[in-house]
Amino acid sequence: MCFGAVSLAVVRPTLPFVWDETVHLSQVMPNVPASAFDAHRARGIVALAYPAVAAFGSSPAAIRSYLAPLAGVGLLLAYLPWLRLRPGPTAPLAAGLFGSLWVALFYAPAVMPNLYVAFAGAATTGWLLVSMLPGAGRGPLVAASSGMAVAALLRPTDALLIIGPLLLAPLWSTRGRLRLAALAALVGGFLLGWAPWVVEAYARFDGPLARLHTAATVDGQGLYDLVPTHLRALSGALLCSAGRRCGHYQPAMLAWWFLALLLAALGVWGAVRKRRATAMLVAVAVASAFAVPYLFTVTVVAPRFLLPAYALVALPAAEGLLAVLLAVRPGRLRVVAVVAVAGVLAAHVAVQASAARHVADHQRVPLGGEAAAVTVLAEAGVRPGCALFGDLAQPLGYLARCFGDWRVDLHSPQPPPEVQAARQRGESVAVLVAPAKPVGAASYLRAWRVLPIREPGVRLTAYLAPRP
């Protein structure tokens, strides 16, 4: 619960909702048309947020105050099985290392799935390993299956990255019926979590393969060295694209990133020397399998994408840190080492909390501009019973109580079918275009009313369709 309280204190519960959050909330928010739900999204986070929406409505403060303690419970559940695998300070220290990251603090009260995928991934890995212990019983397998289902409900493609190396763990470490039971638990939870996504794929996207293909075109796929972009994004950029300069290298952020990898290597090495390396090797394998696609293939870069990898790397990193302390001889020197490490950790927490606060404060400017932009649109006649298309259409649509879809074809002289359908329904329609985008081919816009929007962090040209 301390994690949730700190996140609320740092981010502040009044932070307005960002783009992705508005898409998720619009699916269940009363009096708000459901925004276009893209192929790469899943409805697990929508279900997670629904109780807060049903109880508190649209208030950001109430919804964030609900999600932050929920994230604290998630952090506890994520590392609970690791207390059985590593009795002692390893699991609490790992939870502290992970929970103190600015990315985790910032997204704890957010209507976003990545942090909960991290919790589910760490819990699933831990309970699967616990199930291999002598006399573990069926409970750990049920917990592992449940964690796998939660990960798949939240982000099905991320669940693929988690389950891959986990399917190899029972083959290596167990025999006979236990091996089959472990595999069945993982696969069963995975399929259960994927089921809603697959059903929706058949209903809206011509099947799972077509949906995966569409999702890949949104996120961007290829082979790139995205490590530098990820490292720059740690300075506070929430979303970047490959080939674009995003953020900057910040020494404090680079230090913890590389130090965490070094400590994780020390933790694994120490576990190998003590002949109890299975748990740490599996954690590193799952973290690596998860991180590699995001570091080298997915062209959309965001610090939150790597949260599941960080949650698992924190475990061997914690063991590495403890190994460093234990390597110092008992006595005054060890006391000095403990004090020094405590000081470094305190500085780390302070830097991360400050970064989370900075990111939250930085977001308030464009989010305030979005609210002002909605006021401009309302004064021009774009009121509920409306549809917005184009840049920022979804967050502005959420605030204006309009349907929103970021996709709009500006290369056709005729209005896209979805725009025509909205007009035929009698809705007020606006196409929002960023200043850098040419609209010469979309000749139909020339007959529409032009409304410049120039608010803090929001620069758009709104083309308002004449009433049919």
Image (cartoon, rainbow, N blue to C red):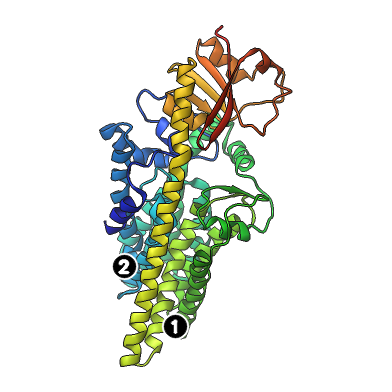
Which mark is first along the chain, 1 or 2? Answer: 2
Residue closer to the observer: 246 or 108: 246
Residue closer to the observer: 129 or 302: 302
Residue 314: % across, % down: 43, 67
Residue 110, above or below 59: below
Residue 139, above or below 300: below
Q: Is residue 83 visible?
A: yes
Residue 399: % across, % down: 42, 28
The residue carrying mark 2 is 136
Q: Secondary structure at mark 1?
A: loop
- Distance from Cα at disc 2 to Cα at disc 1: 20 Å
Q: Quadrant of the N terminus?
A: bottom left
Residue 293 falls in image quadrant: bottom right
Q: Of all residues shown, which one is farthest toward the top?
A: 468
What mark, if any, has residue 340 been given in the picture? Answer: none
Q: Quadrant of the C terminus?
A: top right
Residue 448: % across, % down: 62, 14
Identified by mark 1, the residue type is Arg
Q: Is residue 354 left or right of residue 224?
A: left
Residue 382, above or below 15: above
Q: Is residue 148 visible?
A: no
Q: Of all residues shown, which one is farthest toward the right?
A: 441
Identified by mark 2, the residue type is Ala
Residue closer to the observer: 232 or 265: 232
The residue carrying mark 1 is 275
Q: Secondary structure at mark 2?
A: loop
Residue located at (48% from left, 77% from top) = 268
Q: Is residue 341 left or right of residue 389?
A: left
